Amino acid sequence: MKKLILRNDWMGKRPIIRIEFPYDFELKEMVKQFPACNWDTGKKVWWVPYSDDRLSEMLRFFKGKVWLDYSELKKVEMPQEKASVVLSNLSAENSKEIQLFEQWMRNMRYSESSIKTYREVISVFFRFLDNKPLEEIENSDLEKFNTEYVLANAYSSSYQNQFVNAIKLFFTNRKGIKINPQIIYRPKKEKVLPNVLSKEEVKKILDSITNIKHKSMISLIYACGLRRTELLQIQLKNIDPNRKLLFIQQSKGKKDRVVPLSDKLLELLRSYYKAERPKVYLFEGEKVGGQYSGSSLQQVLKYAIKKAKVKKPVTLHWLRHSYATHLLENGTDLRYIQELLGHNSSRTTEIYTHVSQKKISEIRSPFDDL
């Protein structure tokens, strides 16, 4: 069984529990799901706010999934005014309400990712309120949760927006509850520029891969601007070699789209198919007809980056960003890039204008006119 090591640490003047483990994609995804879990970019470690009951919560959450080594975890004496909010266990009644809400979302064809996120956010909200009966929850409870939990723990505006969306949808769905989620403050979303590789860096990464299956997967993500899940869900029937098209079905937002396949890419895919002979999915795992593992795909890229000596924390999504940026630099219209990426709004696609080397380099400095 995989192991997590728990240790004491401090985030400024606030005690925290560090969650340490050798890099493992599936383990990382599991840790991320624990309520109140955070990633510290400076210390490069996952952590949760310390509380006297936190260890018990973690033992319940990870029971049967992973072994917790808390031999080095010590009790911390905290001043009363600095004590972390201790969340109670979810009551059976509220747990039932969440299950009904989850069932409704699934019937409404919400994605499993959205269902899981909303379920966990609402669970934390109910636990913060100490399982207060739903009919007694008021607008002031929402404001209190936002102030004393979200802001007090310095959670991101992204998490705050998830909370707003989840609460609004939950109370809209549950009839007869007198509450107005519309008053919840919705923070401005941070404007974070996408990470982009140069064409030379992409070529170095691809050239470092000798396994034809691995090379085909990473090449296809960059060549078509795919998300990881989109690549893993491609079936043989989704490829039309005669028309040189790839059909992406029911991707993010339940949308279908079509992207072109270049002659060079088709030649690579043909060579891969002759070597591997997949049955259902274009890229299959150890089980015939089964999908390739997402964690294994990330490991393929990680090894290629190391071998290519690219000194950047490249992820699979960087390749999608790079694809869009390089298209823009080649003169492709933003409207076409929007369609190729499957963006609902042109505003999402316009962010690539901020990282396009060609567009920025064309700007003339007033210094040259002096």
Image (spheres, rainbow, N blue to C red):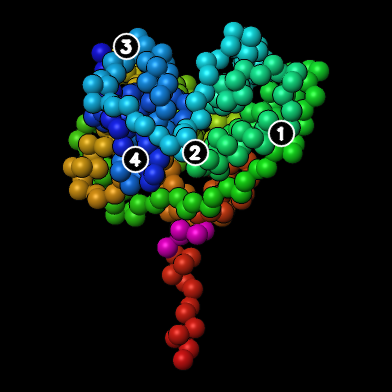
Disc 3 marks which residue?
A: 287
* Chain part drawn in magenta: 353-357
Query: Which residue type carries mark 1?
Result: Ser
Question: Can you give x and y, in whole percent of width and height, for residue 158 in the image?
Answer: 54, 40
The residue pinned by badge 2 equals: 81
Residue 190 % position (x, y): 54, 50
Q: Secondary structure at mark 1?
A: helix
Q: Which residue is label 1 attached to?
A: 140
* SS category of the residue bearing label 4: strand
Q: Could you tell whether 191 is left or right of 235 in the image?
A: right
Q: Amino acid at mark 4?
A: Trp
- The amino acid pointed to by label 2 is Glu
> Among all residues in the image, which is located at the extreme bottom?
370
Which one is nearer the viewer's eye here, 248 or 28? 28
Q: Can you identify the residue that label 4 sits on?
A: 10
Of mark 4 and mark 1, the one earlier in the sequence is 4
Q: Is residue 31 left or right of residue 257?
A: left
Q: Amino acid at mark 3?
A: Lys
Q: Is residue 154 above or below residue 112?
A: below
Report, in whole angstroms, how far the alpha carbon at label 3 lies from the one at label 1: 53 Å
* Nearer mark to the viewer, of 4 and 3: 4
Q: Main secondary structure of the magenta part?
A: helix
Q: CA distance from mark 3 to mark 2?
A: 55 Å
The residue carrying pointer 3 sits among few (fewer than 14), some (14 to 19) or many (20 or more) residues within 10 Å by Cα, namely few
Percent position of residue 366, x then y: 49, 83
